[in-house]
Amino acid sequence: MMKKIITGLLMLSSLSMPVACAGEIAAPTSPATEPNPTPAPRPEPAPGPTLGIMFDRVPDVISTYGKTADINLSFTNEASEPRTVTPFPPEIKIIELPDVKPPGIVVRAFPVGNGELTLQLGESASHSVDWDQKNDSGEQVPPGWYSVEVTLATSRGSAMRVLVLPPEGVMEKTIDVNQSETVNGITITLERVELTATGMKVYAFNIPPDYNLPQGPMLAPPQFMALHAFAEYSIDGGAMKQTFPSGIRFLENGMQHTWDEYLDPVPQNSHELTFRITKLGDWEGPWEFEIQLE
C-alpha cells in the first residue's frame, strides 16, 4: 500500500514540472501563468549563390608597341570561409577585342600553374603576368585593344584590357561628317567621328519608321529598345574589324547611336576611315561611309 502511495506522488510531481525540449532550457512558470505557446517554425532561407575566390576588375593598361605589358591581377575571397584556388595561377588568356561573338580570338594562352592559393575571408592576393605582346606563335600582335580573360571555379571573364599603341603614334581630332545613306528605305546619318589617344567614338542618327515617344525619352516603346546598330570599320582599306553594338539615346526627333567601346585608335599617318553599319535592328544594310582623315 505504501509503495502505491509513493508511486502516485512521483507521477503527480512529474506532471507539475516544466519539461525541456532537446537543445532548450525550459523557463520556470508560475502556477497562475499559462506557458508561452511554442513559436511556429521559421522557413529555411532559400540558398543563395555560392561565392568563392573572385578576380577583381583592375584598370586598363596602355602599352607601347613592342614593349612588355605588365599585367597585375588581383584575387579576393568573397566567401564566408577560407577558400583555395587550385591550380594557381589559373587559366589566363589574351583575347582580341571586340569579342562580339564568343568564344573570342585567343592570341595568347599562358600555362596553368601547379600550385594553389588559399585566402581567408575578405583577403586579397595579387599575381603578375608579363606579356611580351607576342601571340602563341611568337609573333608581335597588331596594335589595338585586347582583353585579359581569367577562368576560376566560381567566375570567368575579363579582368582588364590592354591597349597596344601603334608604333607611329595616334591621330587625335574631331571630324564632322554629316553624311547620309539610305538603304531599304532606312536613312542613317553619320554625324561625327572623334579620334582620341585611346580609341574612336562614332556618332550616327536615324529616324525609325513610326518613331514617337508617347511617354517621353525615358520610357521608349519596346520596339525601339532593340534597335541597336552593328558595325565594322577599317583604316586605309585594311581588314574590317567589328564593333560592339551601338549604344542608343532617344531624342524627341529620332535616335542617336554611339560606338565608343574599345574601338582602336587611328594611327597617326592614316588617310581614310571606312565605317560600315551592317544592321539596324532587323533591317539589313550596309550603310557605308568613307571619312577622309587628312
Image (cartoon, rainbow, N blue to C red):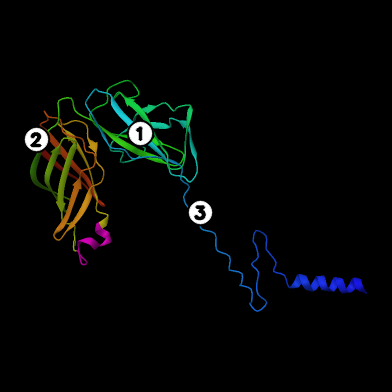
Which residue has dot 3 on it? 47
Mark 2 / mark 3, whichever is N-terminal: 3
Question: Disc 1 or disc 2, which is closer to the eye?
Answer: 1
Which residue has dot 1 on it? 73
On screen, residue 261 versus residue 158, left or right, reads: left
On screen, residue 80 versus residue 137, left or right, reads: right
Q: Residue furthest right?
A: 1
Classify residue 21 by image quadrant: bottom right
Q: Nearer the viewer, residue 113 or 278?
A: 113
Which residue has dot 2 on it? 293
Give the extent of the magenta segment: 213-224
Quadrant placement of the N terminus? bottom right
- Residue 288, visible in the rendered structure: yes
Q: Residue at x 80, y 71 (%)?
A: 11
Instruction: Tell me the CA gap for discs 1 and 3.
Output: 30 Å
Question: Disc 2 or disc 3, which is closer to the eye?
Answer: 3
Mark 1 / mark 2, whichever is N-terminal: 1
Q: Is residue 214 magenta?
A: yes
Q: Residue furthest bottom?
A: 32
Does 137 appear above or below 91? above
Q: Position of residue 134 (x, y in %)?
A: 30, 23
Q: Name which residue type carries label 3.
A: Pro
Q: Name which residue type carries label 1.
A: Leu
Instruction: Tell me the CA gap for discs 2 and 3.
Output: 57 Å
Does 75 appear above or below 7? above
Q: Which mark is residue 88?
A: none
Instruction: Tell me the CA gap for discs 1 and 2.
Output: 37 Å
Q: Residue at x 79, y 74 (%)?
A: 12
